[in-house]
Amino acid sequence: MKNRNVLILSTGFSLIFFAYSSVERYLTPYFSSLGQEKASFVILLILYIFFTLGNLFAPSIIDRYGAKKSMILGSFFYFLFIFTLPFKSLRLTTIAAALIGLGGGLLWSSQNSYIVLASDEKKHGESNGYFRMLTSFFSFLGVIIFGYLVKFFSFEIPMYIYSLFPLIGLFALTFLEDKKLDYDPLKKTNFDIRDSKLIRISLVGFSTYFIHGLVIGIVPLQIKEILGIEFIGILLSLFFLVPILLSYPLGKLSDTFGRKKSLLLSYYVMIIGLFLLFLSKSKFPLILGIIILTLNYATMRPLSAALIGDISTKKNVNIISSFFWFVQGFGIFSSLLLSLIIQNGITYIISIFTIIAILFLIRPVISNLEQTKKDLLKDTQ
């Protein structure tokens, strides 16, 4: 990867999510150790409600101040959230969760806009694959190290240490070049986010992050029940380890193999993984289901990000990116709510039928991405 800005962007996010990805995956065990297991679901629900809402306001902020400054602002709240957790104050953590939700919406909308503007038009898959590879590598290290630190020092000391990494990542992002838009951001457009094609294609992001909600919600509890708490870090780290190995080559391959074929294959893998987790009353189907879902994870996340580049231009990239993250945030919220209400195998059956329904809805839209791009551009005129 020779693109300097993509390298800096990936490094900054890697440092931020070295910390946050680790802490997020231990939230349910952490609150469980405090005798407040359901509190972790409530905190995550609040976080992703505000994350979803934050994406409604992100386009105007990014248009006015630029993607770089927006990312720097959003990343600060990741430090704040992790730093407040050891205080064991549910009220303080709830406020911090709302703030990181708003900041996260701004951070990720800005990231998607920036990487589209910074990348070659024919290399969206490669750029997003590299980004996912590097951030997954650091997140993998973070989860493994955090697990060992918790074993020796409990949760509080590792959380204080990890709260410093988002600040280091914030500093790294200051070295990015500013990317300018080729239109007046204060000029109103008649772009309609209710466009049926945009809604349907954004369901790719919904699917991807619906799975993410299961991974941070019900799956850690399932691992704890069947294998023990010490296996949470080991198995969930696979959701970073596999993308380290596969996200970059698969993202690059999707640029030539075709986005449609890559997406359809990923959906089939997703359904198989969910079905195995439904059957996981013992070690083997649980471990196999997690491994298969990691293969989907390695493919779907760079693909859904690359789709934004495929269907947008500089005139509408900010609002399309923010709308995608709005839908993706709703995907996480939906699966967390489902996990909170139904903490058993029925969760996976509902998830499977949801994914199958989405597959039927998106198939016609992803068949002709160039036409979708033209249609969305017309709406921006």
Image (cartoon, helix red, strand yellow):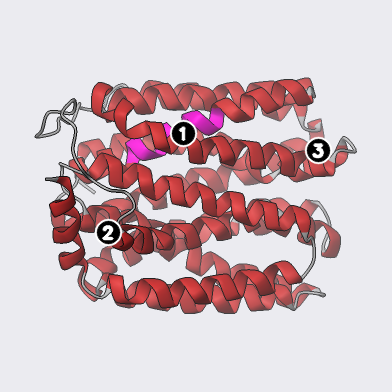
Q: Which contiguous range is marked in magenta?
A: 100-111
Residue 102 within the segment the image draws in magenta? yes
As drawn, the label of residue 125 is 2
As drawn, the label of residue 102 is none
* Coordinates of residue 177 in the picture (x, y in percent): 20, 27
Q: Is residue 238 left or right of residue 52?
A: right
Mark 1 element type:
helix
- Residue 208 in view of the camera: yes
Mark 1: amino acid: Gly
**Location of residue 311 (image quadrant):** bottom left
Compute the Cα span from label 2 to label 1. 26 Å
Circle 3/circle 1 CB separation < 8 Å = no
* Coordinates of residue 241 in the picture (x, y in percent): 52, 57
As drawn, the label of residue 54 is 1
Compute the Cα span from label 2 to label 3. 38 Å
Q: Dividing the image into 4 quarters, which one contains the C terminus?
A: top left
